[in-house]
Amino acid sequence: MVVRAMAAGARPPLALLLPLLLTFSSSPASAAADTIAANSSLADGQTLVSAGGVFELGFFTPGTSTARFLGIWYMGVAPQTVVWVANREAPITTGTTASLGINATGFLVLADPTGQVFWSSAPSNVSGAGAPVAQLLESGNFVLRGGGGAVLWQSFDYPSDTLLPGMKLGWDLTTGLDRRLTTWRSAGDPSPGDYTFGIDIRGVPEGFIRAKNRTAPVYRNGPWNGLQFSGEPEMEPNNSNFRFEFVANATDVYYTFLVDGGGAGGVVSRFVLNQSSVQRYVSPPGGQGWSLYWSLPRDLCDDYALCGAYGVCDTSGGLPACACVHGFTPASPRDWALRDSSAGCARSTQLNCTGDGFLRLTGVKLPDTTNATEDAAITVDQCRQRCLANCSCLAYAASSIKGGDSGCIIWSSQLIDIRHFSNGGEDLYVRLAASDLPSNGDGSRKKNILVAVFVSIAALLLFVFGGFFVWTRFFRNRGTTFQNAQRFNSFDSSVPLTPVPERSKENESGENKDLNVTLFDMGAIALSTDNFATWTKLGEGGFGAVYKGELDGGQTVAVKRLSKYSTQGLDEFKNEVMLIAKLQHVNLVRLLGCCIHGEERILVYEYMENKSLDKFIFDKSRSAQLNWFKRFDIILGIARGLLYLHQDSRYKVIHRDLKAGNILLDKDMNPKISDFGVARIFAGDDTDSHTRKVVGTYGYMSPEYAMDGVFSVKSDVFSFGVLVLEIVSGRKNRGMYSGGGEQTSLLSHAWKLWREGNALELLDEAVAGAGTHRGSEVLRCVQVALLCVQERPDDRPHMAAVFLALGNPGAVLPQPRLPGFCSDRGSTSTDGEWSSTCTVNDVTVTIVEGR
């Protein structure tokens, strides 16, 4: 049975039309009822309410759209949270009135009085005496029952973008029904979007996020291991609030979950596919609104096949994140050195099916099981023997860890998409040739362990004493020898650096101990940049110049050389190194290492091919390269990175200098937040901090920070709001000019247009002229930005709410209040609504403008 969406102009056959019109002429359902009988209908303006008052079904208009849709949402929850939509592909246009009823053939039909059908449920093969009845259940399921009570059709079988407790995500193998989630196209358009999340039943079943325009999946959650999905240790099996279930048998393959109590008085939870990520939201008993419980993908290691075949991704040990399984080497060493690991790894020694053994990988997400085979009836030892006896078997693992390892999964094709977890994960046994096995790898050499230990200890002691002698004799004074042999140009001149005294070298050693990052040799840095040649310079800011360099392995890097005149001293340098080295996120720039040598303070970053965001949005000759879809992706990426800093990282970090110049773009125009020199770790939850030294960039600083030195996560939210308005408009916040030569800020201009209902005029002409933008997304971005730049910090949302508002088309947003720093300087207007009532900043601040 399938749900059919008919084109707006389609006409049903006469046999369908006549009974439908007779049905719709009947008396309407009452607004408080939860059922539609065969002799009644539900008109626009009426709703069904579940018995306990949890869910409501009726007509709604999403976002800034003018079309009407039939859907289900949580009753009394603000903003309106829609969980199911009937006519996703056939909106009811303005001026058209439609009703929902049960026709004479026994299925639901959404149509107007002329018989134009917008949606219908297909007739069922189940028959039952009596008239059918449609009912909205307390679970959020909308069911159509026959007279005997048999379910003829249910909304749970046809999800939109949301999975509710008790819903099944997966397959009914007897009917071929595939229940999968599909994103909304935009905030104002619930039609099927570009991403789907469903269960792939090939091989061993597991869940995949897929995009329409990509052949490879976006994300994979791994096979079910009896307790959770292999790639989702967040699914705590002993969690008292949730119960997760996965069923795989001859008739069904599906995942479902239940919550504690559910409905009234219990935890409320929903599972949502939001663009390219799946998110679980919860609302505790008596809670207000939604909280993000977890979101996947969580980091770059969740990108499908990031490290290629036989590569293992791990972000816990810093960068690079990819490494080859023992017994394998990079298939493309040059690409691997450039941090492109997509080619994966190749075996050091080919298998010959004689003397092979297994290497045990612990705490990993099992590889892609699309082509794997499973036998749940055998033991893990039997699985090992079966794999050894099959020359095509490349790896094996237990299929269940519930109550101890049992069952068997066997891989006979390349192992793809493996990641290592610090906590969680499973054991994977990878087949290796005998010569590549560690001495204790598979138990085959355990009898030699004792001898090997003694030999190793003796060799280690000999190596340590020999190494200490060589270091004492030849390398203790290496710093002085190095300085005498190689001289480098000092900052901003061609004058050579003077040799560094011994005392300075000792200080360097002490400084380096605290950094815990890769330390580059000064000679290697100078060589990579041709001794900081002018032609290698990428740009220059208040903290020093940035050069393009190429390391020995061919890796291109960005070398940030701090100027001796920079206000960023040793403390700021250490701060940036330690912070960014411990923060790993796809939307944060990666620090590869640093160098401290005499007066030199150098940072080595991954190279960003497209430099910084301001080079595009403020350059009219290049701004057209960023269409609206890319700008919206950049906004989401920045929000995702800032949310990580504020909430999801091991520290709560306040950036304090978020601006267009500090957003770098990689070769695919993906945004990465950079420059953490003035960032601060924030210890409290919502407590403000004070500083006497106000640092940052004017135009992006919040009023309370610039005027009183008070900063919090809401300071970054203000900067983000300014940045969003700049991305949308292609104009800088400072130095804008309106008609008649009257100088005004971007905030003032945006606020004025918003109040007048003309916010779309803010859109960059280069984008508006192309005509490919979505007006609803533009308006939502402007509204979110104005909420972020409100004058009072308490009025501004947290980044979690900002990210939810940007990515959730069904979110209903409050109206923004007056922004800070929106005074029109030089204005002769007497309209106090946008001039005299706005914040005016007349204080002097210390401005450190990085880059």
Image: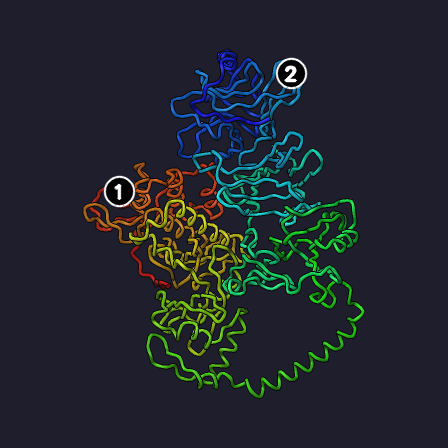
Residue occupied by mark 2: 147
Q: Can residue 377 be seen in this view?
A: yes
> Which one is nearer the viewer's eye here, 316 or 799?
316
Q: Percent x, y for residue 849?
A: 35, 62
Comparing labels 1 and 2, the label whose residue is closer to the camera? 2
Q: Callout 2 environment at 10 Å: few (<14), some (14 to 19), or many (20+)?
A: some
Name the residue beneath numbered marker 1: 832
Q: Which quadrant of the figure has residue 131?
A: top right
Pointer 1 or 2: first along the chain? 2
- Amino acid type assigned to the residue bearing label 1 in the image: Gly
Of residues 111 and 279, which is closer to you in this image? 111
Q: What element carries label 2?
A: loop
Looking at numbered disc 2 in the image, what kind of residue is underneath it?
Gly
In the rendered view of the protein, which quadrant contains the N terminus? top right
**Left or right placement of residue 779 versus residue 364 in this view:** left
Residue at image x 58%, y 84%? 471
Which residue in the rendered view is the most extreme toward the right? 447
Residue placed farthest to the front in the image? Answer: 352
In the rendered view of the protein, which quadrant contains the C terminus? bottom left
Residue 751 in sight from this viewpoint: no
In the drawing, does residue 585 fall left or right of residue 658? right
Residue lying at 57% horizontally and 56% vertically, measured from the top left: 308
* Mark 1 nearby-residue class (10 Å; few <14, some 14–19, many ≥20): few
State the image coordinates of residue 591 (x, y, percent, origin top left).
48, 64
Residue shown at 64% from the left, 65% from the top: 348
Would you place residue 149 above or below residue 377 in this image? Answer: above
Above-or-below relation of 568 to 404? below
Report, in whole angstroms, how far the alpha carbon at label 1 lies from the one at label 2.
Answer: 66 Å
